[in-house]
Image (cartoon, helix red, strand yellow):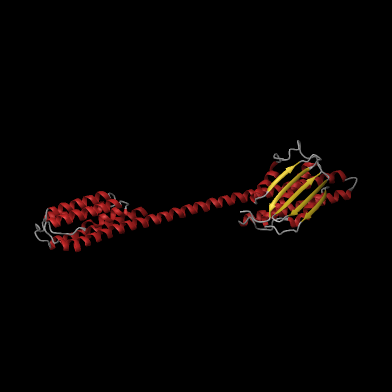
Amino acid sequence: MRGDSSARRGLAADTGLAMLVLVVVGTAITADLGDGSSGPGVTAYAFGGLFSVLMFARRRWPVGTLLLTAGALIVYYRLSYPPIGLAPPVAVALYSAAEQGRLRWSAGTAGVLLIVSTTQRIMEGDDVAYLLGFETVTSAGLMATAIALGDSVRARRGWRAELDRQAHAARLERERESARRVEQERLRIARDLHDLMAHTVSVISLHTDVARESLRDAPEVAERSLAAARGACSDVGRELRLTLNALRAGDPDEGPAPGLDRLDTLAATAAAAGLDIDVRISGPPECLPAIADATAYRVVQESLSNVLRHADARSVRIELDYGADELLISVRDDGRGTDGATGNAEAGGWGLTGMRERLSLLGGGLRTSSPREGGFVVEANIPLEEHT
């Protein structure tokens, strides 16, 4: 529909221009203002019709239309028909060629026409002063105006096309950025759920083992362990509800994200599972950005989960060192460590991988080691300023 409408408008414009050229040229032929012309005739009017018909070919063949119009105009004057000027028959052809990027053809054809016409008129004895001072200047001005108008329309069309391309590129970039953010958010939620479920399942497993072993001999211990397991289930249920509510609302950040303000609760949960927890904080505590605060909490949570599941440890020391530009986190246990004591536990599973990814997004890093004296150490650094 849009293409048909554009074609109809183009045909209407070409028809209007053809009629205008026919009327102007036909009027000039009829007026016969030149001296020594052969007078109006059928052939002269046929040339006027040719100039008019060529308007319908100017869009598809701009250079051909321009050259044919210029050639016909030269032949017309060689046959001594009534003067019709240079600009009226050829102005639209000059405009069309310039509009479609054929600026050199337009300027060159206009220059050749002016030179040929002026030379012929001088040889025929026309007044040089009048010819060069008025007629040639007027024709040159009209031709230059037609060429400049066509070139400006071409430039404006190109400018608009460039703006459209830039807008399209910007729209694609926004879509890619949106997709990237969605992917990052999906990974963040996956990490959160992994950390949450791994930690909670470890706590529940340990407490149920304690309850099973002490059910007959120490019912009060079994009761406390079952209560702790029940509390862990309640906590994980609450966080899962917050996550689902945020996803349904379309805002993954809805609801308070866990931070270091809940470190005491996290340590108490691990202590209730049978670990001796020692928390040490050095340096003036800083108010971390929300994402950095949540990342620090998840690092400690995942480290404790690994201790509960794999380390067979009795005690854990958690150290937070607030420096001038970064927070250093260290979680060290006295368990069996890793085989080989290589210093980098690359095969640490999804938990360590998730921690590394979280920290790298903030410009921080993660280091794991198994010292010779035993145990396992997780060290992380988090910049106190937001990473860009």
Q: Quadrant of residue 334?
A: top right
Percent across and percent down for residue 131 are 17, 61
Locate the N terminus and report the quarter of the image it occupies: bottom left
Q: Is residue 189 left or right of residue 138?
A: right
Question: At x 25% / y 53%, what residue is drawn?
Answer: 56
Locate the C terminus and report the quarter of the image it occupies: bottom right
User: Is residue 23 at least partly visible in the picture?
Assistant: no
- Relative depth, front residue between 84 and 384: 384
Question: At x 69% / y 52%, what residue is drawn?
Answer: 382
Please tell me how many numbered marks the rendered image carries.
0
- Relative depth, front residue between 94 and 221: 94
197 vs 336: above or below:
below
**Hey, which residue is sitting farthest front in the picture?**
129
Percent across and percent down for residue 124 are 11, 56
Question: At x 55% / y 52%, what residue is drawn?
Answer: 177
- Relative depth, front residue between 241 and 64: 64
Q: Is residue 56 left or right of residue 214?
A: left
Question: At x 63% / y 48%, what residue is drawn?
Answer: 187
Q: Quadrant of residue 249?
A: bottom right
Q: Quadrant of residue 87?
A: bottom left
**Hey, which residue is sitting farthest right in the picture?**
217
User: Is residue 337 at least partly visible in the picture?
Assistant: yes
Percent across and percent down for residue 54 are 23, 53
Percent across and percent down for residue 130 are 16, 63
